[in-house]
Image (spheres, helix red, strand yellow):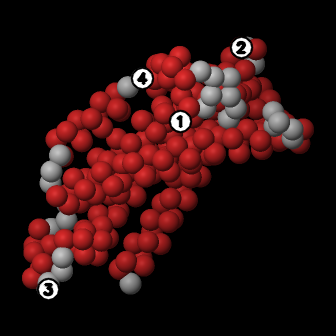
């Protein structure tokens, strides 16, 4: 075991391992591209849905159940299905990652909106605020902590699952996992897994810091 981790340390710190199209720096950039773009697309889809159903109270049952269904979909199976339909491209990977991220964002946004005290909304109406003003100036700021939690959960899930890009012969840190398994190179497999974990933790900490800044700004 000691030898394994010693070899892992050598693998991670070897300067040549960070260079070229198969180097860690390039694979890391690919992984971040897949993860951040998929999460951004999912946010553009899920956030308006969560805000709408949370604000109006309409369609909540359908939206939440569809989100739960999306969470239950097997990611690799979805990748293969879209791959067979669309051919060799990144489309299957992005479809799977977006489908994975949407449920967390929808459910947490909805939960944040419904957690807003009705008396606060009534007070806003009493001051003459219209529906859209209540949404943007009252409900959204109060729901922000739970919304950000949903985004953090979605991003971590996407980062961890973006390794499936290597399953259909594309890049990212998953390349080390799949290539290492094929070559029976345990150090490479472990190195890929460690890098994915570090990226997930780093992005979670970054979003946590952003959440604290936004919350501090809102309460200032």
Determine whether 125 is above or below 140 in the image: below
- Tell me if label 2 and label 3 are in contact, CB under 8 Å: no
Nearer mark to the viewer, of 2 and 3: 3
Nearer mark to the viewer, of 4 and 2: 4
Q: Secondary structure at mark 4?
A: loop
Report the disc number at residue 127.
Answer: 3
**Residue at the location (65% across, 40% down)?**
31
Comes first in the chain, label 4 or label 2:
4
Left or right position of 17 against 158: right
**Residue at the location (77% across, 41% down)?**
26
Locate the C terminus and report the quarter of the image it occupies.
Answer: bottom left
Decide: few, some or many residues near mark 3? Use Cα within 10 Å; few <14, some 14-19, many ≥20: few
Residue 51 visible in the picture:
yes
Decide: few, some or many residues near mark 1? Use Cα within 10 Å; few <14, some 14-19, many ≥20: many
Determine whether 7 is above or below 186 in the image: below
Comes first in the chain, label 1 or label 3:
1
Residue that mark 1 sits on: 94
- Tell me if label 3 and label 4 are in contact, CB under 8 Å: no
Q: CA distance from mark 1 to mark 3?
A: 45 Å
**Residue at the location (18% across, 46% down)?**
60
Report the disc number at residue 182.
Answer: 2
Q: Secondary structure at mark 3?
A: loop
Q: CA distance from mark 3 to mark 4?
A: 48 Å
Q: Secondary structure at mark 1?
A: helix
Determine whether 43 is above or below 28 in the image: below
Report the disc number at residue 44.
Answer: none
Nearer mark to the viewer, of 2 and 1: 1
In-front residue for pair 60/89:
89
């Amino acid at each position: 075991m000691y030898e394994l981790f010693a070899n892992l340390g050598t693998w991670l710190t070897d300067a040549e391992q960070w260079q070229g199209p198969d180097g860690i720096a390039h694979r890391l950039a690919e992984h971040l591209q897949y993860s951040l773009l998929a999460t951004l697309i999912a946010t553009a889809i899920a956030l308006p849905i969560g805000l709408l159903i949370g604000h109006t109270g309409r369609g909540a049952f359908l939206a939440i159940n569809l989100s739960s269904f999306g969470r239950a979909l097997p990611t690799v199976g979805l990748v293969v299905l879209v791959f067979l339909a669309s051919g060799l491209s990144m489309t299957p990977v992005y479809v799977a990652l977006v489908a994975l991220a949407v449920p967390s964002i929808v459910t947490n946004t909805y939960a944040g909106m419904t957690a807003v005290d009705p008396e606060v909304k009534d007070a806003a109406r009493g001051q003459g605020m219209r529906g859209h003003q209540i949404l943007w100036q009252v409900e959204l700021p109060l729901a922000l902590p739970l919304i950000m939690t949903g985004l953090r959960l979605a991003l971590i899930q996407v980062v961890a699952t973006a390794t499936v890009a290597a399953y259909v012969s594309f890049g990212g840190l998953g390349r080390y996992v799949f290539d290492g398994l094929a070559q029976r190179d345990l150090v490479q497999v472990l190195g890929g897994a460690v890098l994915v974990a570090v990226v997930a933790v780093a992005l979670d900490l970054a979003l946590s810091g952003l959440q604290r800044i936004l919350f501090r700004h809102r309460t200032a």
